[in-house]
Amino acid sequence: MSRFFTRNLEFRGRLVRGVLGALSLITGIILADFYLWVCLGLVALGLFAIFEAVRGWCLMRACGLRTKV
């Protein structure tokens, strides 16, 4: 299981995931007054993307799919 969670992102991929995660998180917080379910989804995705950026790990790459970044 520890091999599944090994680092598989370089700096550029971490930066992209961090920026996208922050944008999703901010958008989810802004939409909280209007669409609760959309807000919760965006916040969850944003937090997960930030986790991937901090950890340097991509779920899709860990599952064997090749990503561009």
Image (tube, rainbow, N blue to C red):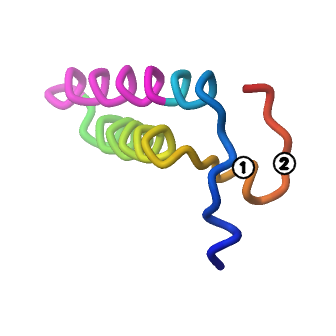
Going by the picture, which residue comes out furthest to the left?
33
Q: Which mark is residue 25?
A: none
- Residue 28 locus on image (x, y percent): 29, 29
Residue under pointer 2: 65
Q: Quadrant of the N terminus?
A: bottom right
Residue drawn at (41%, 38%) of the image: 50
- Residue 60 locus on image (x, y percent): 72, 49
Residue under pointer 1: 60
Given the image, on which type of amino acid does mark 1 rest? Met
**CA distance for labels 1 and 2:** 5 Å
Q: Is residue 23 magenta?
A: yes
Is 32 left or right of 54, judged from the image as shown? left
Is 55 left or right of 27, judged from the image as shown? right
Q: Are marks 1 and 2 in contact (CB under 8 Å)?
A: yes
Magenta extent: 18-34
- Residue 40 locus on image (x, y percent): 31, 44
- Looking at the picture, tell me which residue is in the foreground, 17 or 35: 17
Q: Is residue 43 above or below residue 18?
A: below
Instruction: Determine crowd level at label 2: few under 14, some 14-19, many 20+ residues with C-alpha closer than 10 A.
Output: few
N-terminal of the pair, mark 1 or mark 2, is: 1
What kind of element bears circle 1?
helix
Given the image, on which type of amino acid does mark 2 rest? Leu
